[in-house]
Image (cartoon, rainbow, N blue to C red):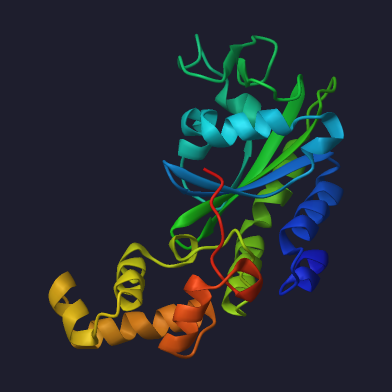
Amino acid sequence: MSRIIAAIGEPDFAARTAAALCAFTGFDLTALILHRDPLRADLLFDNFDRVDGWSGIETYLRATRSINPMIAEGHIPRALRARDFRSRGKPPVGSGIVWAPEEELGYRTVGWPRRQEEIALHIPFGAAIVEIGLYRDRRRSSAPALLLNSLGAMGRPVAAAFERHARLGHLPEWASPSGILTPRETEVHDLLLLGCSTEAIALRLSISRHTVKDHRKAIFRKLGTSSLAELFSRAHGSPSQGGYGRAAS
């Protein structure tokens, strides 16, 4: 955790977090993905260029993440093992899937490296989920339960590091309000950017003026701004100027 904490506020925070978790688990490949909602995801970091696996990442972001049973399962933060989610029959029919009984899930995303052992840490990030996938060549024995339990125990501290990184105002180009703010705060944020007054927002959302002001304070705190002018600048500026940046899908 010390390496992750030391990376807070740095532009390569996601990459250094990934490297620290690879070193801790002994896994080689990693992909950090921010799942905003069923239709949107951002790639925070990956090192799949080591195995020429970018096409697999691209297909996962575009198509197959929506059927990933690990994402749909249970509460977060938590550590998961892919083999525990193996399909008991044919995988869901869809673009980008290869039926592969030898793989842990029973199928594989097109372009994904073959015969990988996978564990993952899923953490909350505002209203979104950060998926930290860790991969290595399959071995005779898989990662022990103790390692998975230790990874799970890191979930809350890692989530706190992501939140702290965002609150400091060091929002990298993959961050956006929908990944940090609650759904209601996002509505207020968007109306503020449209130039709506406190009274107008209260009427539009059927909430009190006091509640609008509370949401505004929370928005400023989470996005590291202190005024509407800064909020406008961050929203409409380039990534280097603090803009929210692009989405991967």
Relative depth, front residue between 248 and 143: 248
User: In this image, 191 relative to 4: left or right?
Assistant: left
| Residue 59 in picture, x, y percent from top left | 60, 29
User: In this image, 120 relative to 231: left or right?
Assistant: right
Q: How many marks can you see?
A: 0
Image quadrant assignment for residue 204: bottom left
- Regarding residue 123, the answer to whether it shows in the image is yes
Q: Tell me which residue sits at (80%, 59%) in the image.
A: 16
Image quadrant assignment for residue 26: top right
| Residue 118 in picture, x, y percent from top left | 71, 32
| Residue 208 in picture, x, y percent from top left | 17, 82
| Residue 10 in picture, x, y percent from top left | 75, 71
Task: Indicate whether 145 appears above or below 17.
Answer: above
Image quadrant assignment for residue 193: bottom left
Q: Tell me which residue sits at (75%, 58%) in the image.
A: 17
- Regarding residue 206, the answer to whether it shows in the image is no
Task: Indicate whether 150 appears above or below 197.
Answer: above
Q: Tell me which residue sits at (82%, 56%) in the image.
A: 20
Q: Tell me which residue sits at (48%, 72%) in the image.
A: 235
In the rendered image, the quadrant that contains the N terminus is: bottom right
Task: Indicate whether 160 appears above or below 211.
Answer: above
Relative depth, front residue between 244 and 208: 244
